[in-house]
Image: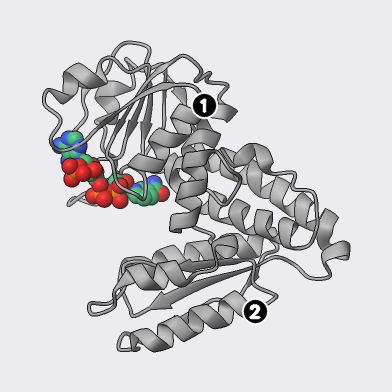
Amino acid sequence: MALCLDGRQLAAQIESRLQACIAAGLAQAGRPPGLAVLRVGDDPASGVYVANKEKACTRVGIGNHGAHLAAGTPAAEVLAAIQRLNADPAVDGILLQLPLPAGLNEGPLLAAIDPEKDADGLHTLNLGRLLKGEPGPRSCTPAGVMALLAAAGIELAGKRAVVVGRSILVGQPMALMLQAANATVSVAHSRTPDLAALTRQAEVLVLAAGKPEMIGAEHVSPGAVVVDVGIHRKPEGGLCGDVRFAEVEPIASAISPVPGGVGPMTVTMLLVNTVSSWCSRNGLANPLGDLLP
Ligand code: NDP
């Protein structure tokens, strides 16, 4: 039976570390860390995600400075809200919840977020820092995957890793982080011929194609570590990932479930980026550095 890469359990452990870190620095900082989740419009899935993030902040003691703007808010007003949060000394992390309503272009708005307060780690400057191995906020989902692998004691140096998916949100930063950990990395995408031949070479296989249950036993070598980033709502109810779990679990040496694998880690890394920013903005040593690959 494969080892379960349990994101819920690890997220709870990291939340305890965050609570301790905040308690230790509170006197010197004079205020708790603050995260602002900026939501525009009424996308229902976003409503659930934002509520989860706010609950997680409350659990660890991060102040919530979020705002919810109406769907028809002009770009200039959204920009002004971001600029106010950039200037607010009580805010250490800013997240613009995507997708934005039709008519709002996310590019210039994401670029307007102060890179030092970029809780999502997706600002162009921070992606460049990741590429160059410089410190900075890290993209939450791939950083969460790295934390799951590290907590399970999975050695990456010298391993053959394959990432399926090349998005800026997941696949590209994932490949950079695995490479920085000295894995030899291949990235597959929709134009990759004979995907199964490539994925069978993987000792560590990360799936972020966004295709429900596309990966089966024929894609996985015995003993591989399998991390499933995909999240999909099944028509009959419940969630699944990119992997056919029941088929792959008996072959893999370790596997992340959906739900309860990468998902909880994504939210936790948002908190890690926020608390790390709070530490650096208040001259505190950051005890969370091991979580920022
Ligand atoms: P995107 O749709 O932006 O990217 C998907 C990538 O997969 C693309 O690079 C695409 O290739 C590639 N791809 C699609 N089909 C295939 C295929 N048949 N074979 C090989 N590659 C393929 O998705 P995201 O990266 O944003 O998200 C991926 C998944 O992860 C989604 O299910 C999303 O819901 C989930 N997710 C989960 C999170 C979590 O917290 N657990 C957080 C973020 C995302 P090409 O570039 O050629 O189009």
**In the image: residue 116, left or right of residue 17:** left
Query: In the rendered structure, which amino acid carries the disc numbered 2?
Result: Asp
Residue at the spot 70% in from the left edge and 61% down from the top edge? 278
Q: Which mark is residue 181?
A: 1
Residue that numbered label 2 is attached to:
88
Residue 11, percent from left and from top = 58, 44
Number of marks in the rendered image? 2
Most foreground residue, 150 or 16: 150
Q: Secondary structure at mark 1?
A: loop
Q: In which quadrant of the rendered view does residue 31 lie?
A: bottom right
Most foreground residue, 236 or 278: 278
**In the image: residue 88, left or right of residue 4:** right
Measured Cα–Cα span from mark 1 to mark 2: 36 Å
The answer to whether residue 139 shows anywhere in this view is no
Q: Residue lying furthest right in this view?
A: 27
Residue 127, percent from left and from top = 45, 49
Q: Earlier in the sequence, mark 1 or mark 2?
A: 2
